[in-house]
Image: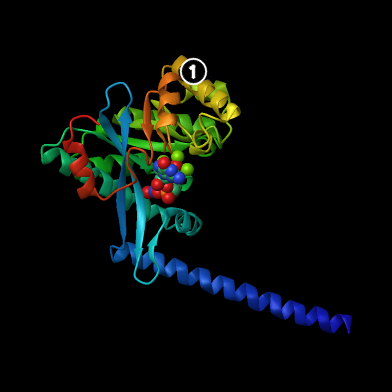
Amino acid sequence: RAKEIGRDAMQIFTAEMANRASEKLERQEELRRALAQQELFLQYQPQMDLSTGRIFAVEALIRWRHPERGLVAPGDFIPLAEETGLIGPIGDWTLRAACRQNKAWQVSGLPSIVVSVNVSARQFQEKDWVERVAAALEESGLDACYLELELTESMIMQDVQQAVETMHRLEKLGVHLAIDDFGTGYSSLASLKRFPVGRLKIDRSFVQDLPADEDDAAIARAVISLAHSLQLRVIAEGVETRDQIDFLREAGCDEIQGYYLSRPIDARALQAILCIPNL
Ligand code: C2E
Ligand code: MG
Ligand code: MG
Ligand code: MG
């Protein structure tokens, strides 16, 4: 009897696994098609310099317009893309699209801004990654100083030596580097000093309960002072309220990004914002 139950359970188990595997294959196929059929697109979220009120940069954020499921957020397909290796072609597409769009804004006479692109660990670790970045710049005609790459602590802490080397090659191209979601990973101060990055992005989780949460207030202040002592600029992500801005300004934070200023929006809508001299 026990054996029988065991066998039945085993069959259910394997059937379930097979189901899940085929579902995953299906999703993967869908994602491959999405790239080929131009269902992926970028939205842009402005970043403001607190001392001038100027929009000086935008972060490019990928979206998937799924024919049946509607708008799919990156959190629901980037992990699959990373797992299956599709992040290679998708990442290349993102980089190229962002560079092309930024160049188009410049050509249309808008004030020049930096476009910031998220990079996943697998992309960053590709041997020809730096060449791919160079190719995207070359192809779009965008000057490297108008491109920033957002890296995360975990991806650069995996192999510090290798990461520093890649970052130096990127720096040589002239692109800017930032550390995204700062504070959520683990970077030693010693390695942080070695990374040729221009700015830190304080993770939204430390911003959302400002100014009331005393721990978060202390963390935000500490990150700002750490950044400044390393000669880096610091931006707060996920800023939604006036009170948060007041706190951040008072704490010496350089820049902000978040719904308070604007949600991520289409290229055309962003263009209208760029025409406003100061917000
Ligand atoms: P991230 O790079 O930290 O991007 C910030 C996320 O916070 C975005 O979510 C943005 O829409 C959201 N956000 C911005 N301001 C606010 C705010 O005031 N309140 C709240 N609640 N949320 C805010 P999104 O677009 O869903 O992207 C999630 C993550 O997916 C990104 O986190 C990034 O890690 C990843 N991602 C997005 N685009 C790409 C891409 O092109 N390539 C790769 N590899 N990853 C991407
Ligand atoms: Mg980011
Ligand atoms: Mg972030
Ligand atoms: Mg994040």
Identify which residue is drawn at 51% across, 31% down. 210
Residue located at (30% from left, 49% from top): 43
- Residue for badge 1: 225
Establish if 119 lies above or below 64: above
Q: Position of residue 134 (x, y in %)?
A: 28, 39
Q: For this rendering, which residue is in front, 123 or 10?
A: 10
Q: Is residue 52 left or right of residue 31?
A: left
Return the residue nearer the eye: 146 or 167: 146
Is residue 139 or residue 262 the one in the foreground?
262
**Residue that sits furthest to the right in the current view:** 1
Q: Quadrant of residue 242?
A: top left
Residue 126 in view of the camera: no
Furthest toward the top, the residue is 229
Q: Could you tell me which secondary element the residue under label 1 belongs to?
A: helix
Residue 191, picture quadrant? top right
The image position of residue 126, as x and y in percent, is 43, 45
